[in-house]
Image (cartoon, rainbow, N blue to C red):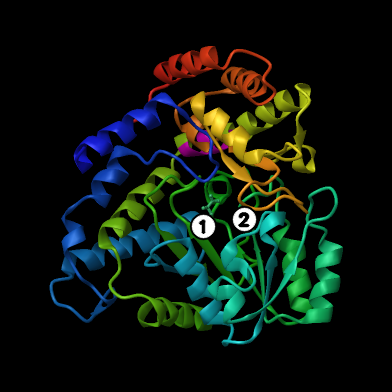
Amino acid sequence: MNVDGLIKLEARRQAETLQMIPSENYASEAVKSAQCSVLNNKYSEGYPGKRYYQGNKYIDEIENIAIERAQKLFGVSFVNVQPYSGSPANAAAIMATVEPGEKIMGLRLSGGGHLTHGHPKITFSGKFFESVQYDVDANGLINYDEVEKLAIIEKPKLMIIGTTAYPRILDFRRFSQIAKKIDAYVLADISHIAGLVVGGVHPSPVGYADVIMTTTHKTLRGPRGAILMTNDPDLAKKIDRAVFPGLQGGPHNATTAGIAVALAEAGSLKFRNYARQIVKNARVLAEELIKYGFKLTTGGTDNHLLVVDLGGGGKDAAINLEEAGIIVNYNAVPHDTHPPANPSGIRLGTPAVTTRGMKEPEMKLIAGWINEIVNRAGEGKSVKVEVKELCKKFPVPI
Ligand code: DSN
């Protein structure tokens, strides 16, 4: 089959299944049309007004609009919208704040952190910097007293707060108080929760983090990209230099336009309601799963995601759920004794199904189906049919 045919099949797969990977979502047609536009054809190394290529009159305007919208939405004075995605953006943030070989500190991957937050040995952040990692406690929670103890012993130059599989509110204030004691910079990676922050259902790190990074395609519902923000003029210059020419060449202008469109959408009342509903949906999904006897890390959720600790067999559970049309990812749980390729848990999120308009009653149905599939409490085949019917009632928005 050719690529066009495969794209059509993928569109059908997305429409007929429940996307419950918490980092995935559906970008609007307006975002996608900006992202697939003629802007793709243009090179524009540099920044608005200071390009190394001619012909950037309109690109400059578009990049400035994206910057201004992000400044307003997040309440920051400086924004760089050029990072290609989250990992390069974190690389730039680290490069802007510490020298190679200096010490950084982030949350362990199995505790819900990210590879770019100093995961040892195999990542740039663990290979080119000295990395120490904090972990979650026995209940799966970040214990800020323990973070403080470790920070005081290790004295990292950069402390990273940000998560990919942590279902609770992050205490940016407390984290920044700890960093101040050892004169460390704070990087807040809000990739997962950016949509919740601008939607008013998660506290903002502005005022507490020196640098804020977010991808633009998760709860924020834009194109695949990232932005870096700060209120520190000195760090602003360092961030710009780290992104270009430090790490990247020409920015992906079509993505920049998609980010500008997504940021306008994220400023609407409709978006605030969506953000609120994401959290309500996750809470109901968690409560229902608990009623079925599932064990959730930290005992529940305050945000858009939940991690189910199955005590093993996360991969099989994810495969079986996919068979029934419920798309999740297998995930490590805190202090997991099983390997990353077949960890103990699965991770579920509500952003994409909320974008489709699903609410509490649908979450109850989904929890029941997850129980049927994972606990083999029912007939898998009928779940597949029911999932498809539900998907038909809640079409992917265009
Ligand atoms: N891949 C993202 C996630 O799924 O959380 C993190 O980069």
Amino acid type at circle 2 is: Ser
**Contact flag, marks 2 and 1 (Cβ < 8 Å):** yes
Instruction: Give 313 or 387, whichever is nearer the viewer.
Output: 313
Mark 2 C-beta to ligand 1 under 8 Å:
no
Which residue bears the numbered disc 2?
Answer: 204
The image quadrant of residue 189 is bottom right
Residue 219 at what x, y percent from top left? 50, 45
Where 143 sits versus 291, above or below?
A: below
Residue 121 at what x, y percent from top left? 62, 74
Is residue 275 inside the magenta stretch?
yes
Q: Is mark 1 on a helix, strand or loop?
A: helix
Amino acid type at circle 1 is: Phe
Residue 184 at what x, y percent from top left? 70, 79
Where 377 sits versus 334, above or below?
A: above
- Magenta segment, prevailing SS (helix, strand or loop): helix
Q: Which residues, given as a range, are shown in magenta?
A: 271-276
Of the 4 image quadrants, the one containing the N terminus is: top left
Q: Which residue is drawn at 59% across and 78% down?
A: 127
Which residue bears the numbered disc 1?
Answer: 74
Is residue 37 inside the magenta stretch?
no
The image quadrant of residue 397 is top left
Q: What element carries label 2?
A: loop
Q: Earlier in the sequence, mark 2 or mark 1?
A: 1
Q: Which residue is drawn at 47% across and 77% down?
A: 239
Q: Which residue is drawn at 47% across and 43% down?
A: 24
Residue 14 at what x, y percent from top left? 39, 32
